[in-house]
Amino acid sequence: MKLYTVKNQVYNDRVVVADDMILTTEHPTSAGSRMLEGYVSLIGSEALGCLTAAGYVLGGKTQVGEFAIDLVGETSKDGAIYKDGKAVNAAACVLLADEACVALTLDVNGSVRRAAAQSGLCSVKPTYGTVSRYGTIPVACSGDTVSLMARNTGECRNALNVIRSCDPKDGTCIPESMRNEKTAPVKRVAVIASLMRDVDAEVNRAITAAAAALTDAGIEVITIDDSVICTSRPAWNILMCAELCNNVSRYDGVSFGHRAESFSGIDELYTNSRTEAFGDLLKAAVIYGSETLSANNYIKVYDKALRTRRVIVEAFAALFEKFDALLMPACSTMAYTEKMLKETPRLVFDENLYTAPASISGLPAIVSGGIQLAGPAFSESTLLDTAAIIEKGGQVI
Amino acid sequence: MRYETVIGLEVHVGLSTNSKIFCSCSAQSYGAKPNTHICPACCGMPGMLPVVNRRVVDFSMKAGMMLNCTINRVTTFDKKSYYYPDLPASYQTTQWFAPIAVNGFVEIETSAGKKSIRIKQIHMEEDAGKLIHDIREDTTHIDFNRSSVPLIEIVSQSDLSSAEEAEAYLERLNILLRFAKVSECEMAHGTMRCDVNLSVRPEGSDKLGVRTEMKNMNSIEAIKRAIEYETARHIDALENGTEVLIQETRRWDDLSGKSYAMRGKETAGDYRYFPDPNVMPVVIDDAWLNAVRDSLPEFPEVKRKRYIDELGLNDYDADQLIKSIALCECFESAYAVCKSAKDAVNWMTSEVMSELNARDMTYDMLSVNGETLGKLILLVSDGEVGRANGRKILSAMFEDKNIDPKTYAEQNDMIVSHDTELIEQTVRTIVASNQKAVADYKRGKEKAFMALFGQCMRELKGNCDPQTLKTILAEYIADL
Amino acid sequence: MLMDTETLRKLELLNQLRLTEEQKNSVLAFFEERAADEALLDAVDTAEVKPMVHVMPVMTVIREDIVSQPFSREDIQRGAPETDEGYWCVPRVVE
């Protein structure tokens, strides 16, 4: 069972672990792929630098799924980790074992949120552009967000305050002056009916418990429906795979990373190196993404997804005129079993129903008590307050 | 059957910024050791993010303005994907959807007269690395110094119709871009590269023939040769069926004087362009646009006319100056100080240009301060320093920009002496030890006088007004 | 999106990958699995809508033209697959 790619023997109450999408200069970063086995970066994560400057100590690196596009980390080159028959995330395990107070992660395709929900932990995916992506492995750059996972909202909040500064080395980082912090407390929360349709009993219970905790605290929880927000899934799958395809094309065996032992000619160097080093899910996503960008498909598929993104963002803006937050599942089930993963290896593209809305729009999403809360841009603080209510009322699984 | 040639040119121009387009590595690495101007970003490694270099946008706007284009006020970057060892990330960041400048033109002049060549667009992009194939057998060596160096690509409409026109067009681009100081435009250094798109059709037809693209021409002469060869090849194919023309990219081989089809993969060409999410749109507001517009130089022909009409220069001298903006600027500053256009241009076209040639510098590399030159010109024209010594001071100014001509002349004993007693004494000394020359001169040999004159001048270290010396020498000898 | 074995072969070449028969079948299945979802996008009215590449407000981020080179060749080529005299090496490419 490989939780850590590297573990430092640190004893400190401010230990942070970084997942293997976060670049570190002192330790290798593999992004969960054979392609980057043993790769030591010359540059380190800006966000991690902020944490260590604020007194946190790096306790180690935790393994991730290959380029973090999977469900919870099960496609790691080091193999899936199972606990009680279900696939678990390495950083989540480290937190549950109390070996770190917070995990610094990269939310590429929702794995951090699913892991947090299934492990009863808290996670924060801040508004896109509020935390520097400098020093992270790029996958789906229009949505990749440096995120945090911890045992409770308090630890998440502390770490978030440290990492959310503007960095001129990241061209998508929003200047402080343009960050309109939401301060008004959450009063009305929406639940989207179509997002509740296919979840199992456990997830249903978690949502119900969360709704009850909110209602007890005087917050209105209202079920509505919305068809636009559900189109986040196909649109995000397209954008994510296309950007992934482009971002992993740099791994070609030429100047760094895995190079095949045998090849004859440059084409074989490329093909053998990439074929040997990439796993099944990644290859499938790369091919899918590549096709969305082909001359035939660009307008009707990729460009269509970009336009749909705008429609979704506008739909969220309209929703957040009437509501302060959206309460929704982070996944359809609290356990991805080995059998499930074997039978539906590309399940993540279906599970994206719940995580794609926040991924595609860049809106903040907090996970607590097994559920996900999304809000308008720059509302992390009030969402955390709301999550704290659920935390107190709900049960840690 | 008579045919006409239809040519479009894609010219890549290397911008003379200090740093690369998306990272802070030096963009000026010509002649440097391999891979000494690189960072993780321009080597394709993950983690660093592209941040646009302001000066790349400034220079691209300037180029657009010099070529009469409309500047796109919101311009974006896109990714173009393909695998090749000189491309470290297997994609090039370029502009596909919203290039910086569109719909321009340049006027060219050939033996057939004037013609306007339309420019479709100018876009910003990053260069690839360099491949070297002949260091070791079976190996290609890669140098990423040039990777991510900023380029603009200038795409013309297919308005050109001959090698002569292509040459005129390239020379026009060259002078305008060097004038705007956005590039050194030197084909030998690779800061100006040109691909030729060519097709042929019966004269008067409005249907386009099969188009071929040619690469690897390293000089304007090679481009002309390539155009002529390819035109002939197309015509031969159409008239005599020697081959079937297909739309393809061909490599020009100047040694053999032929073009060859390049090997290509069947899927080559699907570059899968899509917008780069890491680079925010560059929004050019009025203030920025106007600042760039205000920094443009006068066009060469405007300067030429002004020099001739207002400053009284002759055609030849004006043409010499407009070869380089550096010459013009130096001339104008010098003129402002010395107030004589005639003297200023005289110094520019003789002393300054020979100094540049002697140092193997291009005219654009001139960095002598024009005002200081003006001061030097006055020193000489006022008779304080001899012309020969003036040349030496100019040479010293090339070495050290901070030199003040008068101070330098004083420190180096170059100030012309008006001390007639010293001159008379020198004349007496030289004449006394050159009796034969004196005798020769008295017998009618003019040369002997010049020899005596020369010796006196040398003795006086050139610090003497020639006319004064001649008079004193002649009078002294006459009295003997 | 439609997918067939011939197009799949071209995609392999384009992306420098070689799939096993099993992987090919998986990928074909993948395309089929996503088709229904993709059809949902057709129902979204995007006729008057511009593509959205960046989710956050537009702000031009730019840097000054200053050279800074903190990394040496040795640093960057550390762990490289093959280098020679400061160059990276690959099998000879014919142009």
Image (tube, helix red, strand yellow):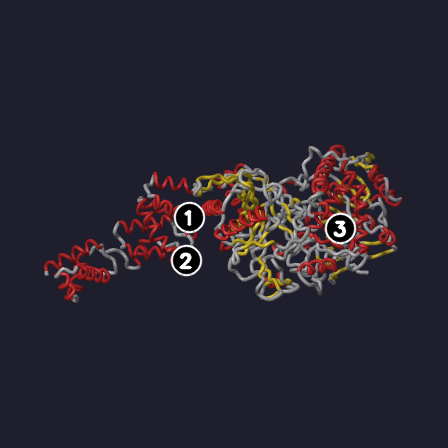
Q: Which label was assigned to residue A169? A: none
Q: Position of residue B129 (x, y in %)?
A: 58, 56
Q: Position of residue A93 (x, y in %)?
A: 81, 55
Q: Quadrant of the C terminus of chain B?
A: bottom left
Amino acid under label 2? Asp
Q: Chain of mark 3?
A: C
Circle 2: is it few (<14), some (14-19), or many (20+) Cα within 10 Å? Answer: few
Residue A95 lies in quadrant? bottom right
Specify whether residue A367 is in view: yes
Q: Chain of mark 2?
A: B
Q: Nearer the viewer, mark 1 or mark 3?
A: 3
Instruction: Determine whether the residue tagged by mark 1 lies in a helix, strand or loop.
Output: loop
Q: Is residue A85 left or right of residue A14?
A: right
Q: Residue at x 26, y 53 (%)?
A: B384
State the residue at coordinates (71%, 43%). Answer: A296
Q: Quadrant of residue A8?
A: bottom right
Foreground mark, 2 or 3, reads 3
Mark drawn on residue C8: 3
Residue A84 is left or right of residue B122, and the answer is right
- Tell me which amino acid carries mark 3: Leu
Dot 1 amino acid type: Ser
Which mark sits nearer the N-terminus, 2 or 1? 1
Residue at disc 3, secondary structure: helix
Which residue position is annotated with label 2?
B360
Label 2 sits on a secondary structure element that is loop
Q: Is residue B4 above or below residue B362?
A: above
**C-alpha distance separating marks 2 and 3:** 57 Å
Query: Which residue was labeled with disc 1?
Result: B324
Name the spot of residue B416 as percent of width and height, x first: 25, 55
**Distance (Cα) linking label 2 and label 1:** 15 Å
